[in-house]
Every structure is written in C-alpha cells, then in structure tokens.
Amino acid sequence: MSSKGPGFAVLYRWRLHEDAEVSFVRAWTRVSELLLSERGSLGSRLHRGPDGLWYSYAQWPSADARKQAFALESVDPEAERQMTEAIAERFPEIVLEPVSDLMVLPSKN
C-alpha cells in the first residue's frame, strides 16, 4: 500500500470550559491560519464531537516540518493564551500515518 497525501498528520483532542467555545474557535482559527500562511502547515480542520470533545486534524509535509514550525516563537501569543484558557482538559496528540487520501478540497471562488 502506498501513501498518498500529506506526509504527516496529527489529531488533537480537547474538552473546553463551558462558554469558552467561541473564544477557542476564534483563537484556534487565528493560530491555524498563521501556521498555514507562515510556517508551512498544509492546513487543519476543527470539529466538535457528539461526545463533548473538540477535535482538530492538522496536516504537515513531514514530522520535521512540524517540529521546525513549533520550535520558533509563537505565531500569536495572545491567541495561544486564549486557546489555553478555554481548554478544561487536553488529551494526548495522536500521530496519524496517511495510507490513502480521498479528501476533496472545495474550490475557492
């Protein structure tokens, strides 16, 4: 089986404080946009699960590219602070190995 798609992906999971969702989404969006535009991220998605957890899936060209991006100073310290304050519980990251990629990206018209 050959890998198709990004070379590296990570799944993040959080339980947020009540009434902190709007702040978290705003801050997560800001940080994710900057990682995409300035640090080489291949993009990410944020989801709310029926179990009350929030999930983010981030793609990178490689594990090394992600490591280098996070070794630099924060892309937005204030947004990262807001994210941290919104998180009630953080779960371990899950590194995912791409096996097959059939995700369709919407066109930007």
Image (cartoon, grey):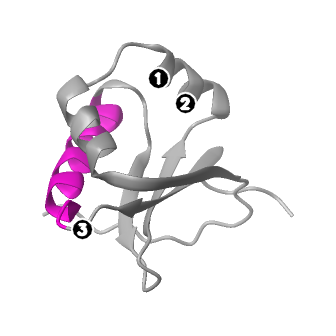
**Circle number at residue 18:** 3
Q: Horizontal placement of 22 versus 40: left or right?
A: left
Disc tally is 3
Q: CA distance from mark 1 to mark 3?
A: 31 Å
- Which residue appears at 39% of the width and 48% of the height? 43
Amino acid at pointer 2:
Arg
Instruction: Find out whether the residues at labels 1 and 2 contact each other: C-beta distance under 8 Å.
Output: yes
Q: With 99 as the anchor, is 20 left or right in this view?
A: left
Residue 100, percent from left and from top: 69, 67
Nearer to us in this view, 93 or 44? 93
Are the residues tagged 1 and 3 within 8 Å (C-beta)? no
Q: Secondary structure at mark 2?
A: helix
Foreground mark, 1 or 3, reads 3
Q: Which residues are magenta?
A: 19-37
In the displayed structure, 37 sits above or below 106; it is above
Q: Position of residue 53 (x, y in %)?
A: 44, 71
In the rendered structure, find residue 66 and report the number of the disc placed on it.
2
Q: Judge the density around disc 1: few (<14), some (14-19), many (≥20) Cα neighbours within 10 Å.
A: some
Q: Which residue is mark 1?
A: 69
